[in-house]
Amino acid sequence: MWDPDAYARYGDERSRPFFELLARVRAERPAYVVDAGCGSGELTAALARRWPEAEVLGFDSSPAMVAKARERGGEVTFTVADVTTWHPDRPVDVLVSNAVLQWVPGHRAVIERWVEALSPGGWLAFQVPGNHDAPSHRAIRELCASPAWADRLGDHDRGRPAGDPIEYLDLLSGLGCRVDAWETTYVHVLRGEDPVLGWVRGTALRPVLDRLDEGERERFTAELAGRLARAYPSGPYGTPFPFRRVFAVAQR
């Protein structure tokens, strides 16, 4: 289950890629704007502020996230839907997806359907984490495969869930789009006790913890905290946490 509070702990760091992605979308007066995988809705509201004349829809597969988003009120419509099956009832002028597609096996087929759903001249913009090989994710995989946890978690390896900029450039160009694709490595400075554990608890660690009971979660996270502390030593200013992200903006 998604935990909106855990995800929001580093809201500023998580939102920065969204605004840098959105800066490359040059739509002027779109009529219909969609946030695919809207989470708790803060960033969807930013779409409504940028294009106040547009109808804005945010959808997410997590009822907890959508419930949180609906608490915000305003003119945005929020609904529960799955990115793998969602289809718009009208052409979309701007479709944005922020850190969602890495959770979707075979998401390149989803991207193809999203391009087909765009209006002529419409925009698709998405970003995905590109940090599968980062020490944080290796630590999770290695602990899952360790003798203490292999019987329950040994199959936890999602492969390489996201592509690189050239892969998305090739895909979207082949679909007839003009494409801007790039990557950025942020170095976030995290503070507090076990800050990297706090970060991954809201994202990469979620599928693992969902498979454990409460006592097992405590034991697993305690051992993982030690591994992460060794992988990411802290300094007097906090804990530096490099995080690579991959971006693509395409106009049909």
Image: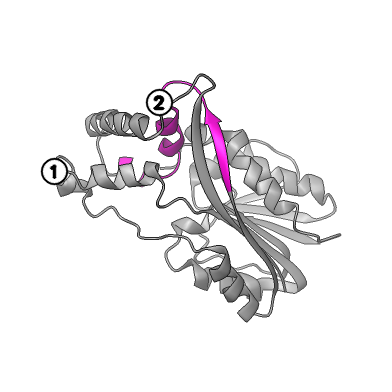
Toward which corner of the image does residue 159 lie, by quadrant? bottom left
Residue 209 screen position, x and y as percent: 32, 40
Report, in whole angstroms, how far the alpha carbon at label 1 lies from the one at label 2. 24 Å
Question: From this viewpoint, is residue 110 visible?
Answer: yes
Q: Which residue is mark 1?
A: 147
Amino acid type shown at disc 1 = Pro
134 horizontally vs 63: left or right: left
Residue located 36% across and 29% down the image: 229
| Residue sitting at x 41%, y 45% | 204
Q: Is residue 41 visible?
A: no
Q: Which one is in front, 56 or 23?
A: 23
Pick whichever, 1 or 6, lies toward us: 6
Task: From this view, report whether residue 167 is shown above or below residue 245.
Answer: below
Residue 60 on the magenta segment: no
Give the x, y percent position of residue 223.
26, 31
The image shows residue 99 at horizontal and vertical percentages of 55, 51
Examine the rendered structure and indicate whether residue 207 appears above or below residue 190: below
**Quadrant for the C terminus in the image:** bottom right
Q: Quadrant of residue 178?
A: bottom right
Residue kind at label 2, given as amino acid type: Asp
Identify the image's colour scheme: rainbow, by chain, secondary structure or one colour: one colour
Determine the secondary structure under disc 2.
Answer: loop
The span picked out in magenta is: 185-210
Question: Which of these two is toward me, 78 or 130?
Answer: 130
How many residues crowd mark 2 within 10 Å: few (<14), some (14–19), many (20+)?
A: some
Residue 194's tag is 2
Asked if the stretch drawn in magenta spans residue 205, the answer is yes
